[in-house]
């Protein structure tokens, strides 16, 4: 079994590990081969790309989930007396008490640990998903790629409830639909994303993405991260790229909007990094686009690790 790590781990900073030297340090996105799951708290594994290939200890998903939940409990101060002990007689009693009282905390946490993956021969990703803070340049990147490579990329035309302007053609820049029709389609889960602007609704229909795939093109989407819940399937086979805010040099570009961009970017990275196939810091837009073109070429021509749910 192979898994992709969805959190960062350093055994040197872990007080729960029986022996720090026996632990394996890994980062988000690292591929780990699982050697043994015999111990409830500590799995044995080795990094897939490591030179020496020695096996070591990594926290089991259950241990990691409890650790995250305990930190959240400390933060919310909902259980100041909780010892969060893993060992000894208190465990069962504590666990029941915990689960009864703190399901709400669990629900709020996106508890991610490891995702089982499988290595596939080269295949074409169907969707390019651009994530990033608002104003980081995703729209420009998307438009540039479509203009440069119209035989390769396309953008799904959005639907809207606003009335068409005099020279607007249905299906060119927008599909025009009635409010009732759009609400009906939303309730049928036919939209990937939707929202309202100036009394009109706008949205991206899943069907428009599928039509792009049928033409043999890659659909480019600049969406909110929540859309990945729908997109991360074999049907849409996304390549997820995070466009990070430009690096701020102290004393040079301390512009307020850049700082806001940087802050929003950091929050997104902290929350959703386990979904990213690639991160590009957008210091220079032309360089970012070139890097992206090379990465797409590589991912479509080299073997790749994908979630096991895409295959079985």
Image (cartoon, rainbow, N blue to C red):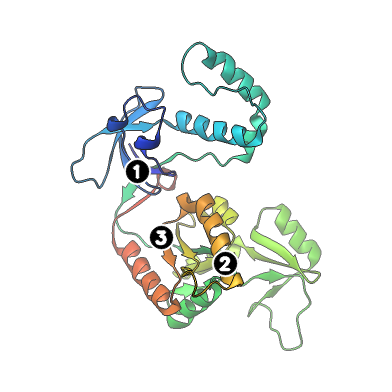
Quarter of the image with the C terminus is top left
Residue 267 location in percent, x, y?
56, 55
Q: Nearer the viewer, mark 1 or mark 2?
A: 2
Which residue is at a point 68% across and 62% down the rendered structure image?
Answer: 194
Left or right side of 23 for 272: right
Marks 3 and 1, how far apart at CA: 17 Å
Q: Nearer the viewer, mark 3 or mark 2?
A: 2
- 271 up-or-down from 53: above or below: below
Residue denoted by label 3: 278
Give the crowd class for mark 1: few <14, some 14-19, many >=20 residues within 10 Å.
some
Residue occupying the far left of the picture: 52
Query: Closer to the N terminus: mark 3 or mark 2?
Result: 2
Marks 3 and 2, how far apart at CA: 23 Å
Residue 50 location in percent, x, y?
23, 45
Left or right side of 200 for 6: left
Marks 1 and 2, how far apart at CA: 30 Å
Residue occupying the far front of the picture: 251
Element type at mark 2: helix
Name which quarter of the figure residue 3 lies in. top left
> Which dot marks residue 263?
none
> Which dot marks residue 259?
2
Residue 53 location in percent, x, y?
21, 40
Badge 1 vs badge 2, beta-carbon distance below 8 Å: no
Residue denoted by label 1: 26
């Amino acid at each position: 079994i192979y898994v992709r790590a969805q959190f960062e781990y350093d055994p040197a900073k872990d007080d729960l590990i029986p022996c720090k030297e026996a632990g394996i340090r890994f980062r988000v996105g690292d591929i780990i081969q699982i050697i043994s799951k015999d111990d409830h708290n500590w799995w044995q594994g080795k990094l897939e790309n490591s030179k020496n290939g020695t096996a070591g200890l990594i926290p089991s998903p259950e241990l990691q989930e409890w650790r995250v939940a305990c930190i959240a409990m400390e933060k919310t101060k909902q259980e100041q007396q909780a010892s969060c002990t893993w060992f000894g007689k208190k465990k069962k009693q504590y666990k029941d008490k915990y689960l009864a009282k703190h399901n709400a905390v669990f629900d709020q946490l996106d508890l991610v640990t490891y995702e089982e993956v499988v290595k596939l021969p080269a295949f074409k990703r169907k969707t390019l998903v651009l994530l990033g803070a608002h104003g980081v340049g995703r729209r420009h990147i998307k438009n540039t790629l479509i203009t440069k490579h119209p035989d390769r990329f396309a953008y799904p035309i959005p639907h809207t409830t606003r009335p068409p302007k005099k020279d607007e053609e249905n299906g060119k820049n927008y599909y025009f639909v009635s409010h009732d029709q759009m609400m009906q389609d939303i309730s049928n889960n036919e939209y990937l994303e939707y929202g309202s602007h100036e009394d009109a609704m706008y949205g991206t229909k899943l069907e428009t993405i599928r039509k792009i795939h049928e033409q043999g093109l890659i659909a480019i989407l600049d969406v909110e991260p929540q859309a990945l819940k729908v997109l991360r399937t074999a049907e849409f086979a996304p390549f997820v790229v995070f466009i990070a805010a430009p690096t701020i040099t102290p004393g040079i570009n301390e512009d307020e909007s850049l700082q806001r961009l940087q802050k929003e970017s950091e929050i997104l990275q902290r929350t959703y990094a386990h979904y990213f196939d690639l991160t590009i810091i957008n210091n220079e837009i032309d360089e970012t686009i070139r890097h992206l073109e090379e990465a797409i070429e590589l991912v479509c021509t080299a073997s790749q690790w994908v979630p096991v749910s895409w295959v079985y």
